[in-house]
Image: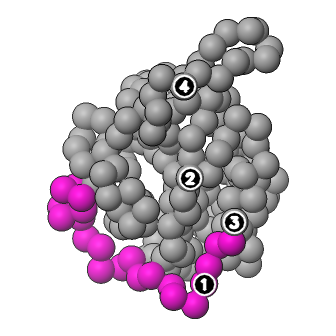
């Protein structure tokens, strides 16, 4: 994955007067509680309304089996959003968490059913490993619900340090990832 389709384009940071590159980022969204499609649509709309974020592509909607979830958890609806952004990685993470909060995300139990999950998967070639953020997402390369929709919209997609999505997908069970032709996220 490149930093952006035009990696030399810079955008002024109005707060500091500094310049930051436009980077391509991959955001995975999912929901398995309530009106799942409406929540995915809301996440995409919130990303679209975010300053310094331009949506490049949105995958189809996929229904997926829950992974590492408590017994009895319902199926997820998942999609992947490809964006261009000049936001810092921590600002992008803060925005993702704020979108989750706006849709009532409860973080009290790990891998519990959720109203909305908004995960920052990759941001350009950026590597991060601190208490609040790991980039690339540490399990994205193992998740069919991330790789299948990502490959649909970005056949050249790559997870830094792991490989190309097209290659990684062959090592993952995708049998529980089903494209929902009857559902659509609208831009």
The crowding category of the residue bearing disc 1, from other C-alpha atoms within 10 Å (few below 14, some 14 to 19, many at least 20), is few
State the SS at label 2.
strand
Residue at 41% from the left image edge and 82% from the top image edge:
178
Q: Are marks 3 and 1 in contact (CB under 8 Å)?
A: no
Q: Quadrant of the C terminus?
A: bottom right
Whether residue 147 is visible: no
Is 170 covered by the magenta stretch?
yes
Q: Is 169 drawn above or below residue 82 in the view shown? A: below
State the SS at label 1.
loop
The residue furthest top is 17
Residue at 30% from the left image edge and 73% from the top image edge:
174
Q: Where does the image place residue 186, in percent across and percent down from the top left?
A: 68, 72
> Quick one: 31 or 21, which is closer to the camera?
21
User: Which one is earlier in the sequence, the residue at label 4 or at label 2?
Assistant: 4
The crowding category of the residue bearing disc 4, from other C-alpha atoms within 10 Å (few below 14, some 14 to 19, many at least 20), is few
Q: Is 17 drawn above or below residue 72 in the view shown? A: above
Q: Nearer the viewer, mark 4 or mark 1?
A: 4
- The residue to which callout 3 is attached is 187
Q: Which residues are magenta?
A: 166-186
The crowding category of the residue bearing disc 2, from other C-alpha atoms within 10 Å (few below 14, some 14 to 19, many at least 20), is some
Colour scheme employed for the rendering of this structure: one colour
Cα separation, mark 4 vs mark 3, equals 25 Å
Q: Nearer the viewer, mark 2 or mark 1?
A: 2
Cα separation, mark 3 vs mark 1, equals 13 Å
The crowding category of the residue bearing disc 3, from other C-alpha atoms within 10 Å (few below 14, some 14 to 19, many at least 20), is few
Relative horizontal placement of residue 64, taking residue 169 as reference (left or right): right
Q: Quadrant of the N terminus?
A: top left
User: Which one is earlier in the sequence, the residue at label 4 or at label 1?
Assistant: 4
- The residue to which callout 1 is attached is 183
Is 2 covered by the magenta stretch?
no
Residue 56, numbered label = 2
User: Which one is earlier in the sequence, the residue at label 2 or at label 3?
Assistant: 2
């Amino acid at each position: 994955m490149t930093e952006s389709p035009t990696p030399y384009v810079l955008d002024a940071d109005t707060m500091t007067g500094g310049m930051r590159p436009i980077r391509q980022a991959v955001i995975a969204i999912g929901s398995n509680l309530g009106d799942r499609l409406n929540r995915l649509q809301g996440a995409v709309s919130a990303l679209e309304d975010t300053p310094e974020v331009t949506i490049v592509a949105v995958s189809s909607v996929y229904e997926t089996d829950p992974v590492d979830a408590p017994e009895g958890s319902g199926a997820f609806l998942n999609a992947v959003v490809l964006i261009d952004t000049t936001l810092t990685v921590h600002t992008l993470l803060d925005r993702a968490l704020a979108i989750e909060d706006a849709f009532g995300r409860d973080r009290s139990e790990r891998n519990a059913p959720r109203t909305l999950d908004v995960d920052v998967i990759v941001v350009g070639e950026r590597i991060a490993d601190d208490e609040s953020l790991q980039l690339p997402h540490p399990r994205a390369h193992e998740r069919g619900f991330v790789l299948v929709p990502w490959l649909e919209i970005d056949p050249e997609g790559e997870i830094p340090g792991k490989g190309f999505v097209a290659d990684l997908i062959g090592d993952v069970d995708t049998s529980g990832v089903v494209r929902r032709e009857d559902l659509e996220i609208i831009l």
